[in-house]
Amino acid sequence: MSTHEPFGVTDRETDLSTRLTYFLIGGTIGAIVALLFAPKPGRELRSDIADATRKSVDRTREAAAQIGAKAGEYYSTATQKASELAEAAREAAARQSERITAAIEAGKQAYVEEKQRAELPEARES
């Protein structure tokens, strides 16, 4: 008896599980075929198919409603985060603008002061 490494499963156990899998698949297919060919009147069979279809549609609608609710939550959260980021960016831009304005004003003031200093010696010379 050989084994498959590293789990120690024998060829016989693998063969048995394969046979069991095929048996279950065959049983499922047999059950489906038996339902399709069961001696039911056409009206009853159509009613069963319609009921199954309605149930599937209802389950699909419920799932879609749940997905829609989740999507709404995600959209709301994303919108809120985007608004927060936009506000933070506006505030940062305003702060930067204030700094630039202050730097320009300081530069203008320094220019005026330097110009006055430069004009003073010229005024003394005259």
Image: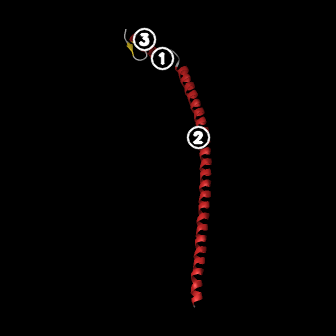
Q: Which of 62 and 55 is in front in this view?
A: 62
Report the Cα–Cα distance between label 3 and label 2: 47 Å
Residue 3 located left or right of residue 96: left
Q: Relative to 109, does residue 30 appear above or below in the rendering?
A: above
Q: Which residue occupies 56% across, 86% down?
A: 122
Quadrant of residue 60 within the rendered picture: top right
Instruction: Determine which of the numbered discs, if any, sits on residue 28 in the image.
Output: 1
> Can you say which quadrant of the picture contains the N terminus?
top left
Check disc 3: other Cα within 10 Å, few if <14, some if 14-19, many if 20+.
few
Query: Looking at this rendering, what residue extends furthest in the bottom direction?
Result: 126
Q: Which residue occupies 62% across, 54% down?
A: 87
| Mark 3 or 2, closer to the camera | 3
> Can you say which quadrant of the picture contains the C terminus?
bottom right
Instruction: Determine which of the numbered discs, if any, sits on residue 91 in the image.
Output: none
Q: Give SS at disc 2.
A: helix
Q: Relative to 119, does residue 91 appear above or below in the rendering?
A: above
Instruction: Determine which of the numbered discs, if any, sits on residue 71 in the image.
Output: 2
Amino acid type at mark 3? Glu
Q: Where is residue 41? Give x, y as percent.
A: 53, 18
Q: Relative to 49, does residue 78 appear above or below in the rendering?
A: below
Q: Where is residue 124? Give x, y as percent.
A: 59, 88
Quadrant of residue 117 within the rendered picture: bottom right
Mark positioned earlier in the residue sequence (1 or 2)? 1
Q: Which residue occupies 62% across, 41% down?
A: 73
Amino acid type at mark 1? Thr
Q: Which of 25 and 15 is in front in this view?
A: 15
Report the Cα–Cα distance between label 1 and label 2: 37 Å
The residue under label 3 is: 13
Report the Cα–Cα distance between label 3 and label 1: 23 Å
Q: Which of 23 and 101 is in front in this view?
A: 101
Amino acid type at mark 2? Ala
